């Protein structure tokens, strides 16, 4: 009698960009895109894996772009953080329609729509089988949602950060511009920093490096890829 294969990870943090919730141009909120994500998340939750999600806000507003256009940087960053809450609520709605109980926790207090971020409460939700979405970034300007993902992953004891992208891993140059680009199966934090491979910003990266938090970069847009990663298949690139 063969025993069913167990997932490789029991607690993961999934980092989604805001653009991945958007339309073909990465703008606004596309119900189809959100549903696609929710289905993949629910699929791994049903395996008994505890899932935490950190979502960006670039499909609605990006603080850096705002500051380039004359908005004060801190104000722009707060606007971007509020955009991540809108995305978090959209994803929560989709997940709960699929029967996956979900809680949104915000780094910025807004008790009418989301719980405040409380680490112990978040861990309790996970233990009860709920998906937890962290919105509002870190709650501070000048920090990206990548940094929020690195911070929260370490705080709640995730085993890995799964960075969802539209490419199947990390390449030595842009595979869309260079057909000869080479994909890495595995790469060290230091190599990523030295080669300036834009996996995450340097603050997020340093946090992961200092705390030995592995990052898996993979193509989230292929059906069932999240499940394949969680089951331990070698797809994408692991940074460790």
Image: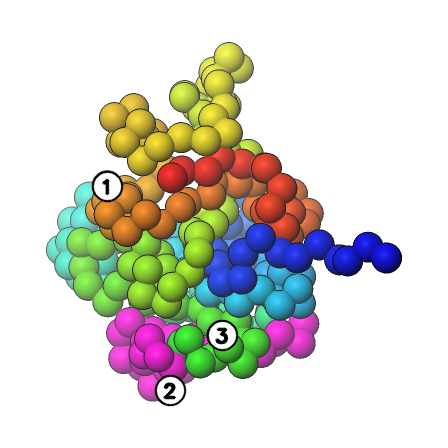
**Distance CA(mark 1)–CA(mark 3):** 29 Å
Q: Which residue is the site of mark 3?
A: 126
How packed mark 1 is, by other alpha carbons closer than 10 Å (few <14, some 14-19, many 20 or more), is: some
In this rendered view, identify the residue nearer to me: 192 or 86. Answer: 192
109 drawn magenta: yes
Looking at the image, tell me whether mark 2 or mark 1 is earlier in sequence order: 2
Viewer-nearest of discs 1 and 3: 3
Residue contact between numbered discs 2 and 3, judged by CB atoms under 8 Å: no
**Distance CA(mark 2)–CA(mark 3):** 22 Å
Image quarter for residue 37? bottom right
61 drawn magenta: no
**Distance CA(mark 2)–CA(mark 1):** 34 Å
Q: Which residue is the site of mark 1?
A: 202
Bounds of the magenta span? Answer: 96-121
Horizontal and vertical percent for residue 41? 59, 61
Q: Which residue is the site of mark 2?
A: 112
Horizontal and vertical percent for residue 67? 19, 49
């Amino acid at each position: 009698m063969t025993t069913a294969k167990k997932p490789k990870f029991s607690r993961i943090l999934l980092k989604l960009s805001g653009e991945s919730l958007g339309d073909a141009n990465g703008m606004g909120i596309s119900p189809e895109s959100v549903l696609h994500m929710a289905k993949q998340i629910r699929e791994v939750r049903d395996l008994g894996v505890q899932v935490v999600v950190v979502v960006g806000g670039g499909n609605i507003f990006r603080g850096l772009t705002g500051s380039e256009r004359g908005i004060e940087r801190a104000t722009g960053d707060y606007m971007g953080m509020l955009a991540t809450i809108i995305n978090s609520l959209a994803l929560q709605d989709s997940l709960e329609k699929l029967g996956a109980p979900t809680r949104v926790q915000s780094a910025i207090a807004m008790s009418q729509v989301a719980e405040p971020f409380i680490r112990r409460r978040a861990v309790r939700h996970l233990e009860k089988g709920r998906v937890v979405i962290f919105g509002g970034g870190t709650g501070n300007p000048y920090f990206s949602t990548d940094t929020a993902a690195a911070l929260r992953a370490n705080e709640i004891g995730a085993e890995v950060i799964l960075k969802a992208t539209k490419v199947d891993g990390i390449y030595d140059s842009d595979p869309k511009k260079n057909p000869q680009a080479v994909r890495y199966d595995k790469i060290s934090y230091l190599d990523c920093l030295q080669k300036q491979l834009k996996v995450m910003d340097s603050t997020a990266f340093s946090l992961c490096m200092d705390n030995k938090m592995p990052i898996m970069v993979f193509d989230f847009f292929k059906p069932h890829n999240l499940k394949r990663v969680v089951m331990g298949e070698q797809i994408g690139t692991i940074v460790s």
